[in-house]
Image (tube, rainbow, N blue to C red):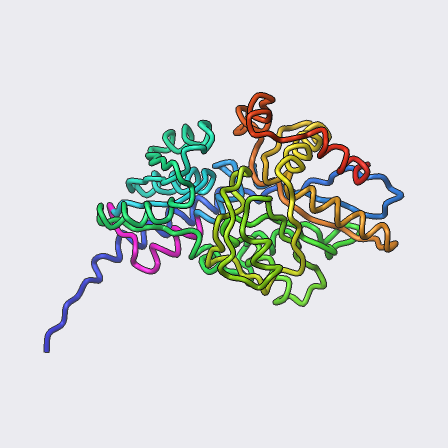
Amino acid sequence: MEIIDRSADRAWTDWAIKTVEADANRSADTHLLPFRLPDSWGIDLYLKDESSHPTGSLKHRLARSLFLYAVCNGWIAQGTPVIEASSGSTAVSEAYFARMLDLPFTAVMPASTSRAKIAQIEFYGGKAHLVDDGSTVSAEARRLAEETGGHFMDQFTYAERATDWRGNNNIAESIFEQMSLERHPVPAWVVVGAGTGGTSATIGRYVRYKCHGTKLCVADPEHSSFFASWRDADPDAEAGCSRIEGIGRPTVEPSFVPSLVDAMAKVGDAESVFMLRWASKELGRPLGGSTGTNLVAVFRLMKEMRERGEEGSIVSLICDPGQRYATTYFNDEWIAEQGLDLAAAERDLRPLLP
């Protein structure tokens, strides 16, 4: 009988898990901010500020979960190169954790990704590998991983399973704990966007597991496949490349679980940009594009609630800070180059707003 013992490899694994968990232990939870609305509406809106994570976005939670999942599965060991396909924010957060574990990191991203996000990846010691065709990022990341003997993190496959959806301080558990003392503690709706689909999967499973009456709405930008796929029950739906960074995909990703979604809203890019600019003024701080997309869906839902005479609460997310988009969503020249008609968007959305 022959026994081969590789348990010595576990020493680095133990260190890596403790290191990542220690980072989570040092971090406070993100704030749940009330958004001022007229009292006569009878509806309360809250925005969970995920931009306050150390790496500045909702993707910090995902990156932590993906690293723990990969390390615990034995896919990442000491010195393993880590490769990811990303539109920006996930790569920033993964670069942070890769530096923490002294691992080389490369992010494969569309060439249109904002320079601010690329600079942050480089700040954390990562490298940006840019491709002209955004639909090829996953294939290119897989190729690089094979070429270097590294691990392709593959957020678009593993996002829905890497996070413990039953609790363990996931985003859903955090929302409901923070809502417990509010006027309407169980939200009528939670509204999120979908890039990987991981956040919507976590929230959708959690509300079912806890038997909450909360419904989940996913807001999808115009150049994305998720809305058509969900509407038509077509897993092969395709679209273009989203101009709203962080959400929307040209094809339906494995981590998007349509059976968990109660409603979807298709949001025009001009609507998203107008809304993020309007809400930035209301909150006194710049917001990112996906937050604008979320809020268009939120105010549409509030209109329907008001027409039915319903009261309650809605929770959505501030996904990342608007400072990352100074050269795009807050730049009038970029808006003109993209052909976005913000005036028309304002005419359509203004009747929904307070």
> Residue at left 34%, top 38%?
99
Which residue, as the protein is rendered here, is positioned at the far left? Answer: 1
Q: Nearer the viewer, residue 264 or 148?
A: 264
Position of 317 with respect to 112 (left or right) is: right
- Is residue 305 shown above or below 131? below
Is the N terminus in the top left, top right, bottom left or bottom right quadrant? bottom left
Determine whether 130 is above or below 218 in the image.
above
60 inside magenta stretch: no
Q: Quadrant of residue 5?
A: bottom left
Q: Nearer the viewer, residue 266 or 246?
A: 266
Residue at the top extreme? 333
Q: Residue furthest bottom?
A: 1
Q: x and y percent of residue 22 in the render? A: 42, 46
Side (left or right) of 78 relative to 203: left
Work out which quarter of the rendered image holds the C terminus and state it: top right
Foreground residue among 63 and 145: 145
Q: Does 217 appear above or below 95?
A: below
Confirm whether the magenta stretch covers residue 78: yes
Residues drawn in magenta: 64-79
Residue 188 location in percent, x, y? 74, 56
